[in-house]
Amino acid sequence: MPLTMLAASTEYVTSTITADHDITNDAIQVSLPLTGAQPSNWISATVLGVVPGSGKWTATYRLLVGPQAGDVSLEAGSSYDWYVKVTDSPEVPVRKVDTIKAV
């Protein structure tokens, strides 16, 4: 189910990504293209922490979305695909996280 938020709202969107190796020092970026478009404009996310556990590392990250000093603004009536990218070596995985519907 997509995340729905008011286009006039400015708030953090938060998610996690899990890897099978330590991603503590890896850059995490987010792209929010219109639904169906390829991710292209990558924005650095704020990493809140990386927690190891049972051979997995889970990073929690966030991005400020909205018109009041947000990293990106949404247009009412549009839907956006939420992608995350982790810059690691040699891997650079890109995954779709969710969809955001702006109302």
Image: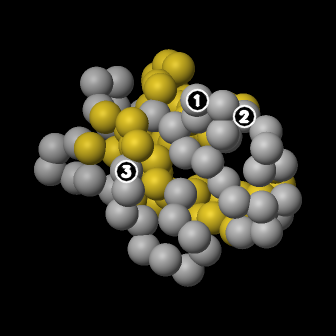
Q: Which quadrant: the N terminus?
A: bottom right
* Residue ID for mark 3: 42
Colour scheme of the rendered structure: secondary structure
Residue that numbered label 2 is attached to:
10
Vertical position of residue 4 compared to residue 55: above or below: below
Question: Disc 1 versus disc 2: distance between alpha carbons?
Answer: 8 Å
Q: Left or right: where does residue 91 sit relative to residue 6?
A: left
Q: How far is the residue under mark 3 from the one under mark 1?
A: 17 Å
State whether residue 33 is above or below residue 48.
below
The kind of secondary structure element at disc 3 is loop
Q: Earlier in the sequence, mark 3 or mark 2?
A: 2
Where is residue 63? Give x, y as percent. 56, 35
The residue at 38%/56% (across/down) is 41
Q: What residue type is disc 1 on?
A: Ala
**Residue at 40 percent of width and 43 percent of height:** 43
Q: Would you identify the image quadrant in which residue 98 lies?
A: bottom right
Mark 1 Cα within 10 Å, few/some/many (few <14, many 20+)? few
- Which image quadrant is residue 21 in? top left
- For marks 3 and 1, the one nearer the N-term is 3
Earlier-in-chain disc, 1 versus 2: 2
User: What label does residue 69 carry, if any?
Assistant: 1
Badge 2 crowding class, 10 Å Cα cut-off, few under 14, some 14 to 19, many 20 or more, is some
